[in-house]
Image: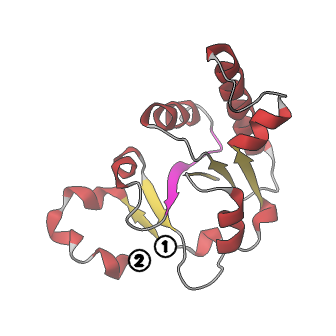
Amino acid sequence: MNLYITFDDKSKIKKCFLNLRKYLIIEIDDVIESLGFNKNNLDNCKSFIISQEILKRIKDGCSGRKLLGIVYSNPELDDEIVRDIIHYTEEIKNIEKVVFLTDKGFHDEYIELFEEVTFYPTMKKVHIIDCKTVPVVWLDKLNELENINDLI
């Protein structure tokens, strides 16, 4: 099972992919609302509670046998949040890898943190597993940058 991390909201994910009922979608706004907090009035204590709830949902989602993967959506992601989630998921046996889900050319500064990157489809709706993933090792090889479009 893979964990997909994206900056985009649930509506964009639904527009791009089919068969999302086999994926757990964790959206930060839904988590905040379910805990009874206001997004505009968060302090350190509430932020900690929210992050623990997200980690709990990821862990609970991994134990479900019917799910194909988990998509975590947070438009306010930063380097620290991404690193914390990746570090946390290393301890979970069912998560094979953490994949960055993004549009091509956006949020490139976060690509190096992930094992793989999956770009949103541009033409039609597809299954997430049908997307071609790009291993991040290509960043180290400048000669292959010219041929990256062949991989996608």
Q: Which mark is residue 101?
A: none
Residue found 25% across the figure and 58% down from its top:
139
Q: Main secondary structure of the magenta part?
A: strand
Give whichever of discs 2 and 1 has the lower sequence position: 1
| Residue 150 appears in the rendering | yes
Specify whether residue 111 is painted magenta: no
Q: Which residue has dot 2 on it?
A: 152
| Residue 17 appears in the rendering | no
The answer to whether the residue labelled 2 contacts the one labelled 1, judged by CB atoms less than 8 Å apart, is yes
Q: Which mark is residue 132?
A: 1
- Is residue 83 positioned above or below 44 on the image? below
Range shown magenta: 93-102
Q: Nearer the viewer, residue 59 or 44?
A: 44
- Is residue 42 positioned above or below 139 on the image? above
Image x and y of residue 79, in percent: 43, 36
Residue found 51% across the figure and 33% down from its top:
81
